Amino acid sequence: MSLQQRFARLVTSLVVRFPFLWRVFRGTMRRQFDQLAPVWDATRVDPAKLAPLQAALESLPDPPRRVLDVGTGTGVAARLSTRLWPDAKVTGVDASPGMIEEARRLATGESYDVADASKLPFAAASFDLVTLNNMIPFFDEIARVTAPGGTVAICYTRGAGTPIWVPPERLQKELVSRGFAHVADFPIGPGIAVLARKDEVA
């Protein structure tokens, strides 16, 4: 891993354990992703690596009406949701203004906003589906904005080799403790997606 990638791994590990530390690292991470935004899709995005997330989303029994992609970057996962469910309202958020600018340029019907994943600007229970692709999960906020009966899909496209990485067993533990039931894991190639459903009674 590069120094930048090692830093992302360190930040992920610390913030998952101690979410309040995000305010220490937020500015540095935002600047890094702003710098990478203009070349991100050309150098970092391989559509084939979305296979675990796509498999997880295609397993949903009903199409979601409201989708939130957290840490959307240039919007690759949000665009996947639009492709799967053209009638859904898909929103992508990211702390990096540079990434959001690129996502808006590449949009296929989604809306994109600059927002901090640790304090999302949405009411409780606003979304039927919340997706994260190679993103630090802020579990309390994920649980807050997911509607009862809604679904969360978290994907790491390079598995344990992903710079921003949380092991599936940790994802399951954190989500179950917040009222989700683990549905399934979707390991494809080096990547893996975890799917969980929120209890119907919030």
Image (tube, helix red, strand yellow):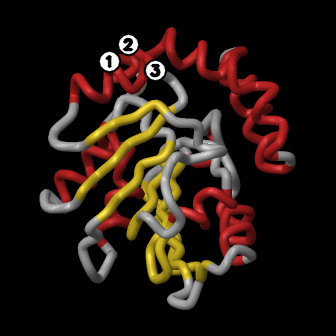
Q: Residue at x 73, y 33 (%)?
A: 9
Residue beneath disc 2: 39
The numbered mark, 1 or 3, whose residue comes first in the sequence reads 1
Give the label, 2 or 3, closer to the camera. Answer: 3
Q: Is residue 52 left or right of residue 79?
A: right
For residue 113, which numbered disc appears in the image?
none
Q: Amino acid at mark 1?
A: Ala
Q: Amino acid at mark 2?
A: Val
Residue beneath disc 1: 42
Residue beneath disc 3: 97
Mark 1 near mark 2, Cβ–Cβ under 8 Å?
yes
**Label 2 vs label 3: CA separation?**
14 Å
From the top left corner, tell me how far across and down residue 20 is, in percent: 83, 42
From the top left corner, tell me how far across and down residue 176 is, in percent: 69, 77
Q: Is residue 202 in sight in this rendering?
A: yes
From the top left corner, tell me how far across and down residue 12 is, in percent: 73, 39
Mark 2 lies on a secondary structure that is helix
- Toward the bottom, the furthest residue is 201
Mark 3 lies on a secondary structure that is helix
> In the figure, 49 relative to 64: above or below?
above
Graded by Cα atoms within 10 Å as few (under 14), some (14 to 19) or many (20 or more), the crowding at tag 3 reads some
**Label 1 vs label 3: CA separation?**
18 Å
From the top left corner, tell me how far across and down residue 76 is, in percent: 32, 38
